[in-house]
Amino acid sequence: MFDFTLLACAAFLAGLVDAVVGGGGLIQIPAIFAVFPKEVPATLLGTNKLASMCGTVVAAAKYTRRVNVAWSTAAPAAVTAFMFACVGAFAVTRVPGDFVRSLLPLILLAVAVYTFKKKDFGSIHAPLHSGMKERWLAMGIGAAIGFYDGFFGPGTGSFLLFLFVRFFGFDFLGASAAAKVVNVACNVSALLWFGYSGHLIWKLAGLMAVCQIGGSLIGTRLALKHGSGFVRKLFLAVVSVLIVKTAYDTFRHLGF
């Protein structure tokens, strides 16, 4: 009973954080692996993905009702993210992810430093592109992030948030809304693979999904109420934790 309560709390907190800036997997994945250390990793990842998808869908729906989502950017990115998440999931069964693992802390550190130094970064919504240039750039970002999410995954939502602000001129709130749409596409794509492979614990996924949805509703409400300034601060906090976590995982994997 304690184990399921722990996972319910982790899912709730993950849904809250993920709804604002992404990075909910940082909370939920370690929790489910700690509770079921002998379970097949793919089954735990599939269970996590179903719960995460439910929370992300709710967050995306809530954002689309309250924020003007830049569909001309989000839709092309979501389409290519869906396709390339499948490619990434296939690639991870053929190619070791050690190189990506070793680079991740450095990439996250660069993202954090850039965001921290530019005080007005993401404070104003001033889209930079339109027409075919916007669509091609969105498709490129969707393909890259989709492949990364299928191949490795940590920090996908945070990377999307940063890229939409940096390359499209969105504010953090608008970027978070667009990121949720793309995240749903990534999650659905990966979930189709896990479901087809039978890697799901349905009852546990259902419990965690309900808690994810609760956290997602509160997280979305906080983001909409407090605006881009709040999202920026939480983004920096989550990225900082991701840097520490991924650096630790890398050193441990290398045997230090």
Image: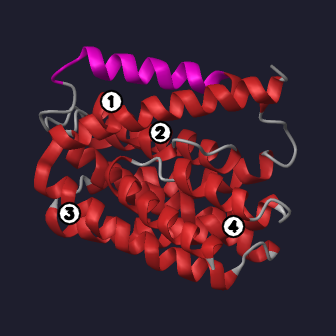
Q: Is residue 236 above or below residue 256?
A: below
In this view, the mark in front (4 or 1) = 4
Label 2 CA crowd tier, 10 Å (few <14, some 14–19, many 20+)? many
CA gap between label 3 and label 4 equals 27 Å
Where residue 167 is drawn, which disc sits there?
A: 1
Q: Which residue carries the number 4 mark? A: 46
Q: Which residue carries the number 3 mark? A: 221
Q: Which residue carries the number 2 mark? A: 141
Verify CB contact (< 8 Å) between mark 3 and mark 1.
Answer: no
The residue type indicated by label 1 comes to: Phe
The residue type indicated by label 4 comes to: Gly
Decide whether residue 123 is among the magenta residues: no
CA gap between label 1 and label 2 equals 10 Å
Q: Position of residue 146 (x, y in %)?
A: 57, 48
Q: Is residue 135 left or right of residue 128?
A: right
Label 4 CA crowd tier, 10 Å (few <14, some 14–19, many 20+)? many
Of pointers 4 and 1, the one earlier in the residue sequence: 4
Of pointers 3 and 1, the one earlier in the residue sequence: 1
